[in-house]
Image (spheres, coloured by chain):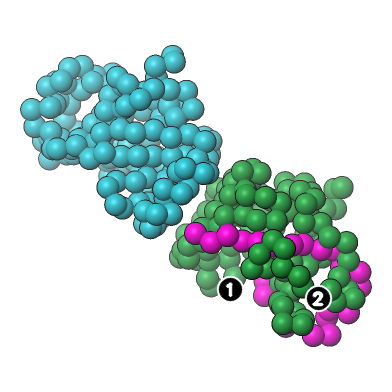
Chain colours: A green, B cyan
Amino acid sequence: MTIEIERRFLLKNDGWRQTASAPQRLQQGYLSVEKERTIRVRIIDDKAWLTLKGYISDVSRSEFEYEIPAAHARIMMDTMCPFKMEKNRYRVDFGGFVFEIDEYFGDNAPLMVAEIELPAEDTEFPRPDWLGEEITADGKFTNAYLSKHPYSTW
Amino acid sequence: MTIEIERRFLLKNDGWRQTASAPQRLQQGYLSVEKERTIRVRIIDDKAWLTLKGYISDVSRSEFEYEIPAAHARIMMDTMCPFKMEKNRYRVDFGGFVFEIDEYFGDNAPLMVAEIELPAEDTEFPRPDWLGEEITADGKFTNAYLSKHPYSTW
């Protein structure tokens, strides 16, 4: 088990694109979406993972992640996941930290969210000028919520 | 993925104990309990599995099972599973088939259920005289239902 400490932000502008990696395409399906636990299938290219997350605080979550055969993940996605989403993920290195920028597709477009993983809840980190409002504590911006209530329907 | 084809029965008497194996103690926790999908953590001694089951029919279910570290399973059981149960499982060989007899503890005592896994939904199999009423299609006897609504509360 790992503890995932993550803060999330909206984006003010497209400045991050100048130093972003090429995107990875993420397909995600949710088998269970509750505040206390989310169970996610993720497919990137020909690899897949099953991930369970428990709630510790708005910033911290317990996380168990297991790689599974992509063929299993595709069947789960097609037959067992009531909620699905797709997004592009970009990596942006900034001041010794890594920001991940998610660009949502489908019903969640044109939402974009920046995430930063931190070693502790109170770790200080630099704020690039494209970083917008913090949404860490806003449950509406979690992937779990977005999968049930897509951004375009708000 | 495997397809699990399973029929379940109550027990008429204790005759099965004469040829039963020593029991295994199963601890089970449920992360998700819905007709369309159940997600189960199972611990037997120092081994553990994460199992996802989807619904095909009352008799057949799709099943994905992954061995996971027992230490992970214990944390999931303690922090993420709203529903838990314990049972002893006995194996009984009869006429070339294997029956598994589950003896429930705690709030589900004194329930006992016999299960047989079959290669096809219409496979014929012998009926030992201790085999009672079939409950395959009775959702109340599924482990998922019992974990939420224990037998002793019926």
Q: Which residues are magenta?
A: A1-25
**Which residue is drawn at the image coordinates 15% and 20% (left, top)?**
B14
Q: Residue B65: in sight, yes or no?
A: no
Q: Real-space Cα distance between discs 2 and 1?
A: 32 Å
Name the residue beneath numbered marker 1: A45
Name the residue beneath numbered marker 2: A126
Toward the top, the furthest residue is: B154
Q: Residue B32: in sight, yes or no?
A: yes
**Which residue is drawn at the image coordinates 71% and 77% (left, top)?**
A98
| Quadrant in which the N terminus of chain B is drawn | bottom left
Image quadrant of residue A109?
bottom right
Q: Are marks 2 and 1 on the same chain?
A: yes
Chain to which the residue tagged by mark 1 belongs:
A
Residue A76 to residue B121: above or below: below
Residue B57 painted magenta: no
Seen from the viewer's position, the closer of residues B148 and B64 is B148
Q: Is residue B102 left or right of residue B76?
A: left
| Quadrant in which the C terminus of chain B is drawn | top left
Residue A93 to residue B123: above or below: below
Residue A17 to residue A142: above or below: below
Q: Is residue B82 left or right of residue B102?
A: right
**Which residue is drawn at the image coordinates 61% and 43% (left, top)?**
A36
In percent of width and height, residue B65 lies at: 39, 53
Residue A2 painted magenta: yes
